[in-house]
Image: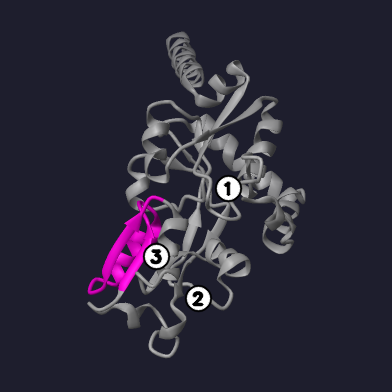
């Protein structure tokens, strides 16, 4: 009996030691010790993250990150980078997490872990007005004579290459560069996330482009973090659940997706 009890105690001791070792390596533990939460993002995805007229990064994701840092009791540090470099930056410890309107995909999930979805979007199309009668949906663009543009490395590129295989697909470093090609008549359509396209039409595209606003895809957005960190993942999921139930999330949604006052603040 004593040997059995001793064995149980030893097993519990080993498990406790393993848990403590895991916690010591946790990103959450490192954030608390450092006193800073480093959030990686790519400004330019309206209204999730963008720059105001003073060069400050603002947006829905940024406000979520600010609430996150507040809950941790640490300072928020925004780490800017191009979207296609965010995951590599996370894996080389340039940031603690990615909050950049990033769609959860199986391919990305092989490299990083994701929190529970905090937002759901879909891809839509902005097309030249002279194509209004010819192009009613993405299937109409799946022809060799059409050129479809999007930003490099985003879900829009994946969807375009998968669902419009016969069209010419071109990518650019920024959303602005890509959509400008359509405005200049050098491309026929721009594929990107609904929130950005909707905001662009409200801000600049009215009368110049046609928004085919029926979503082509279902895309849950998640917060990306390094794999093998259950403590940090647990914290993030509980944080998201909390702000969705205490009114914080609804307040931020209202600020960035219902009220358009922020349009006067951006570059």
61 relative to 71 in the view: left or right: left
Label 2 vs label 1: CA separation? 23 Å
Return the residue at label 2.
209
Dot 3, how many residues are within 10 Å of its Cα: few (below 14), some (14-19), or many (20+)? many
Q: Is residue 144 above or below residue 97?
A: below
What is the x, y in percent for residue 153?
A: 35, 51
Return the residue at label 1.
49
User: Could you say which quadrant of the image residue 51 lies in?
Assistant: top right
What is the x, y in percent for residue 251?
A: 76, 53
Q: Mark 2 or mark 1, which is nearer to you?
A: 2
Q: Earlier in the sequence, mark 2 or mark 1?
A: 1
Q: Of helix, strand and loop, which one carries label 1?
A: loop
> Which residue is at the front of the view, 1 or 151?
151
Q: Earlier in the sequence, mark 3 or mark 2?
A: 3
- Residue at (73%, 58%) from the top-left corner? 254
Residue 163 in magenta?
Answer: yes
Looking at the image, do the residues carrying marks 3 and 2 touch, with CB atoms under 8 Å apart? no
Looking at the image, do the residues carrying marks 2 and 1 touch, with CB atoms under 8 Å apart? no
Q: Of helix, strand and loop, which one carries label 2?
A: loop
Dot 2, how many residues are within 10 Å of its Cα: few (below 14), some (14-19), or many (20+)? many
114 relative to 49 in the view: left or right: left
186 relative to 12 in the view: left or right: left
Highlighted range, magenta: 147-173
Q: Of helix, strand and loop, which one carries label 3?
A: helix
Residue 181 disc label: 3
Q: Earlier in the sequence, mark 3 or mark 1?
A: 1
Q: Please give the count of numbered marks on the rendered protein.
A: 3
Q: Is residue 67 above or below residue 25?
A: below
> Which residue is at the front of the view, 256 or 65?
256
137 relative to 264 in the view: left or right: left
């Amino acid at each position: 009996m004593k040997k059995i009890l001793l064995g149980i105690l030893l097993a519990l001791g080993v498990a406790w030691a393993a848990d403590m070792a895991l916690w010591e390596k946790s990103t959450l533990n490192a954030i608390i010790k450092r006193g800073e939460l480093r959030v990686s993002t790519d400004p330019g995805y309206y209204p999730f993250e963008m720059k105001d007229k003073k060069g400050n990064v603002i947006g829905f994701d940024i406000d979520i990150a600010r609430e996150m840092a507040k809950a941790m009791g640490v300072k928020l540090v925004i780490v800017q980078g191009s979207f296609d470099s965010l995951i590599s930056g996370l894996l080389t410890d340039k940031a603690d997490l990615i909050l950049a309107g990033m769609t959860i995909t199986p391919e990305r999930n092989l490299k990083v872990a994701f929190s529970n979805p905090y937002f759901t979007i879909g891809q839509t199309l902005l097309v030249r007005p002279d194509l209004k009668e010819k192009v009613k949906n993405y299937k109409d663009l799946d022809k060799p004579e059409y050129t479809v543009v999007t930003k490099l490395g985003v879900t829009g590129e994946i969807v375009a290459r998968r669902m419009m295989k016969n069209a010419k697909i071109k990518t650019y470093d920024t959303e602005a560069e890509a959509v400008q090609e359509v405005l200049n008549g050098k491309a026929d359509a721009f594929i990107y996330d609904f929130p950005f396209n909707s905001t662009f039409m409200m801000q600049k595209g009215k009368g110049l482009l046609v928004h085919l606003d029926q979503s082509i895809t279902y895309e849950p957005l998640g917060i990306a973090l390094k794999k093998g960190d259950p403590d940090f993942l647990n914290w993030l999921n509980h944080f998201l659940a909390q702000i969705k139930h205490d009114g914080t999330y609804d307040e931020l949604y209202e600020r960035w997706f219902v009220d358009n006052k922020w349009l006067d603040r951006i570059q």
